[in-house]
Image (tube, helix red, strand yellow):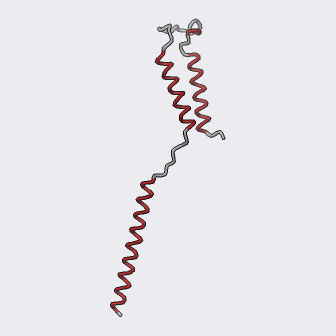
């Protein structure tokens, strides 16, 4: 199923492919006004665009990270268990106090 993450990545890749095809393309230099200063292929731009496409594909393929914090859950479980033990001790102490009064 197509979700927004995959659709957004696809449209970004499409835009980058269009940019790769048109930005400082040696075949299009005659049609570009004003003429670029460098008349050669800029490999740094090419590498940057390809690396962004790779990052977009990675984001599209990988599953999203869940927001569940396991350490926080464990800490809350320990707090809850501690509160239950404390309530049990207090109830036992109150029961013992009632027995002493009788």
Residue 96: x and y, percent?
Answer: 35, 85
Whether 14 is drawn above or below 86: the answer is above
Which residue is the extreme one toward the right? 1
In the image: residue 81, left or right of residue 64: left
Whether 45 is drawn above or below 79: the answer is above
Image quadrant of residue 98?
bottom left
Image quadrant of residue 100?
bottom left
Which residue is the extreme one toward the bottom? 102
Residue 3: x and y, percent?
Answer: 62, 40
**Residue at (46%, 18%) from the top-left corner?**
44
**Residue at (34%, 91%) from the top-left corner?**
101
**Residue at (37%, 83%) from the top-left corner?**
94
Instruction: State which quarter of the image contains the N terminus.
Output: top right
Residue 71: x and y, percent?
Answer: 42, 54
Count of numbered circles on the image: 0
Whether 38 is drawn above or below 95: the answer is above
Instruction: State which quarter of the image contains the C terminus.
Output: bottom left
**Residue at (42%, 71%) from the top-left corner?**
84
Residue 99: x and y, percent?
Answer: 36, 90
In front here: 70 or 30? Answer: 70
In the image: residue 9, left or right of residue 43: right
Whether 26 is drawn above or below 17: the answer is above
């Amino acid at each position: 199923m197509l979700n927004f993450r995959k659709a957004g990545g696809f449209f970004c890749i499409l835009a980058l492919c269009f940019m790769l095809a048109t930005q400082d393309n040696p075949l299009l230099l005659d049609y570009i006004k004003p003429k670029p200063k460098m008349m050669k292929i800029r490999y740094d731009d090419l590498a940057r665009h390809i690396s962004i496409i790779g990052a977009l594909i990675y984001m599209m393929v990988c599953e999203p990270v869940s927001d569940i914090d396991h350490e926080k859950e464990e800490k809350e479980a320990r707090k809850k268990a501690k509160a239950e033990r404390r309530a049990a001790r207090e109830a036992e102490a109150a029961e013992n106090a009632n027995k002493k009064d009788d």
